[in-house]
């Protein structure tokens, strides 16, 4: 049974209570200050709710507390230094909240604590040197904050440390050699500003145990890391004078060559190049097989209407028959270059898709940048073909569909599986790809389904890099000018000039999730008097969940066979709808991350189909 509402004040009167676990519910409000009365409490778990406000200082009265988990809520303010005097010995988990400011120096007083988890907050500053006081610490998770500075040498005294995650921060300097001498089993320093030589001992020899991506200035390390060779590792000369002489020759020679090269480019190249020879085209040509315009004419039967499978803001998609890798049927997206922004969309999609690889992202097979039979510029992208069409065609089959066969309804298992697929794809784009990327146009039309009904996120025409990779052209795709989207799925802050963000994608995903399980689009005619889809669902949640869900997800066969118990279905739906509501909050600061959405949806899957 799941609980909602606030924590009753009466709980604070349970003076002899030793364990309180209210995790995984829909509890709102603040942590009651009269928890100070629970002086015998040893285990407090309020994880995965919607608690707000600051961490109450009254918790310091719990002088028997060894386990404290307040993660996955909406707590704000500083981490009180006073809680560092608690006798915690198992875990302190404050991750996935909105906590700010510096990590208290008093953290070193947690001498018996095994695990500290502060991930996904807004903590800043440096790791205090006093951390060496946590002598039995085994796990330290500080990822996805705003920490900076170097890794303190005081960490080297934590001989029992097995897991260290400081990824997605602003740490800098060199990677300390002492990390290789510790007994670490997992080390994640990805997406920081580290530079210099990577050690070659200990954890750094286990590529499955480390993650160093997103630190462009790192070099060396074991060969399997595929990093650039450090300058200090290059063959040295016997005398410093010889090295200086060679360096001078190299610098002068490079300058002369560069000057001559620039002169030849200016004098020999035509001043106006054909538009189809853009930098992005050259990048694609270096990595993909290029097909000609006439190859596509033949494959689509001269772009016949019978092969039309979809159209969007910047182009039209055709089904094509051509032998490519292990497939014979592909999808060809032809850009409408007369539409303002279409060329930029093409560049964005090319740059994005060449940088990502994931089972739930559409795969680009080839490209075409040529001239058509009228002498006009022609650009197209060739993708893997998705025989089951788009999610929009399944959710709203009465609207125009390009699918050959009649379309049915998605059952609850299929919907939840697709929802997890899409969330997993976004989680990869936001946190695990070569460069963080935001999609900026997530909607059912851009979710495509393969033979096995596995979802693939497509259409990256509006995608944006959060940090430009070294290979991007000078006009970086991080720019926000011209960011658009689709009505109903655009987060409110974009309409007010806000920058593209992972929180913006989370909003679009939340609306998509609500649409999948209610059957109502954000522009549905049933939404009247200015009531949004989010508000419509929120007013019914959680007591009237059955009144707002799409009953088509339950087939007659499922009902007759009693495939799911009503309790399992209800608990699953409540978790899913709650996830959609948390993602689509009006304020970006109140939204949960896609990473958290994946966790909550996996919990919903377990509720629906318990093993």
Image (cartoon, rainbow, N blue to C red):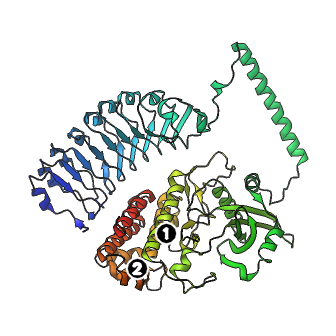
Residue at disc 2, secondary structure: loop
Q: Position of residue 5 (x, y in %)?
A: 24, 67
Residue 441 visible, this orientation: no
Identify which residue is drawn at 15% across, 49% down: 41
First in residue order: circle 1 vs circle 2: 1
Q: Give the crowd class for mark 1: few <14, some 14-19, many >=20 residues within 10 Å.
A: many
Q: Position of residue 447 (x, y in %)?
A: 56, 70
Identify which residue is drawn at 58% across, 85% down: 406
The N terminus appears in which quarter of the rendering? bottom left
Residue under pointer 2: 531
Viewer-proximal residue, 205 or 331? 205
Quadrant position of residue 599: bottom left
Identify which residue is drawn at 53% across, 36% down: 194
Viewer-proximal residue, 158 or 130? 158
Would residue 108 be found to the left or right of residue 490 on screen? Answer: left
Residue 354 visible, this orientation: yes
Q: Measured along the vertical axis of the image, is residue 120 above or below residue 560?
A: above
Q: Position of residue 593 (x, y in %)?
A: 43, 58
């Amino acid at each position: 049974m799941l609980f909602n509402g606030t924590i009753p004040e009466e709980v604070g009167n349970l003076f002899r209570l030793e364990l309180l676990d209210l995790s995984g519910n829909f509890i709102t409000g603040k942590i009651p200050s009269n928890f100070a009365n629970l002086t015998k409490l040893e285990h407090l778990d309020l994880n995965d709710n919607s608690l707000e406000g600051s961490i109450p200082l009254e918790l310091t009265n719990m002088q028997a507390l060894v386990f404290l988990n307040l993660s996955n809520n909406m707590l704000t303010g500083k981490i009180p230094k006073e809680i560092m005097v608690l006798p915690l010995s198992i875990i302190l988990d404050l991750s996935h909240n909105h906590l700010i400011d510096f990590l208290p120096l008093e953290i070193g007083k947690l001498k018996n604590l095994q695990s500290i988890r502060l991930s996904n907050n807004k903590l800043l500053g440096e790791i205090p040197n006093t951390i060496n006081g946590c002598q039995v610490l085994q796990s330290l998770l500080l990822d996805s904050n705003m920490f900076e500075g170097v890794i303190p040498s005081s960490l080297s005294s934590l001989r029992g440390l097995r897991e260290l995650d400081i990824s997605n921060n602003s740490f800098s300097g060199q990677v300390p050699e002492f990390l290789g001498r510790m007994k670490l089993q997992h080390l994640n320093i990805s997406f920081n500003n580290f530079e210099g030589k990577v050690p070659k001992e200990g954890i750094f020899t286990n590529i499955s145990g480390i993650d160093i991506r997103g630190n462009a200035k790192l070099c060396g390390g074991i060969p399997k890391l595929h990093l650039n060779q450090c300058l200090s590792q290059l063959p040295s000369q016997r005398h410093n004078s010889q090295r200086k002489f060679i360096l001078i020759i190299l610098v002068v020679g490079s300058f002369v060559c560069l000057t001559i090269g620039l002169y030849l480019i200016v004098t020999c190249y035509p001043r106006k190049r054909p538009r189809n020879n853009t930098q992005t085209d050259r990048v694609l040509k270096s990595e993909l097989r290029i097909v000609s315009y006439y190859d596509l004419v033949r494959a689509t039967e001269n772009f016949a209407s019978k092969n039309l499978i979809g159209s969007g803001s910047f182009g039209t998609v055709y089904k094509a028959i051509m032998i490519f890798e292990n497939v014979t049927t592909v999808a060809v997206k032809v850009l409408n270059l007369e539409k303002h922004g279409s060329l930029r969309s093409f560049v964005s999609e090319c740059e994005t898709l060449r940088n990502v690889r994931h089972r739930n992202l559409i795969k680009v097979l080839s490209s075409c940048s040529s001239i058509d039979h009228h002498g006009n510029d022609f650009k197209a992208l060739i993708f893997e073909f998705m025989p089951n069409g788009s999610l929009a065609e399944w959710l709203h089959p009465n609207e125009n569909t390009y699918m050959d066969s009649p379309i049915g309804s998605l059952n609850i298992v299929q919907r939840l599986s697709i929802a997890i697929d899409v969330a997993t794809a976004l989680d990869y784009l936001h946190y695990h790809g070569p460069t963080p990327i935001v999609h900026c146009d997530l909607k059912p039309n851009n979710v495509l389904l393969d033979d096995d009904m596995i979802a693939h996120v497509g259409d990256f025409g509006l995608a944006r890099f959060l940090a430009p990779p070294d290979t991007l052209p000078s006009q970086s795709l991080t720019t926000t000018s011209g960011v658009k989207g689709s009505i109903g799925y655009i987060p409110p802050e974009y309409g007010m000039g806000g920058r593209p963000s992972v929180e913006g994608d989370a909003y679009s995903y939340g609306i998509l999730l609500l649409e999948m399980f209610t059957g109502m689009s954000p522009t549905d005619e049933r939404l009247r008097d200015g009531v949004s889809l989010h508000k419509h669902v929120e007013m019914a949640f959680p007591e009237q969940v059955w009144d707002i869900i799409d009953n088509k997800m339950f087939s007659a066969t499922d009902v007759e066979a009693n495939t799911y118990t009503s309790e399992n279905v209800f608990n699953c739906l409540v978790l899913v709808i709650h996830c959609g509501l948390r993602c689509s909050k009006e304020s970006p600061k109140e939204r949960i991350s896609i990473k958290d959405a994946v966790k909550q949806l996996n919990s919903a899957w377990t509720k629906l189909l318990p093993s």
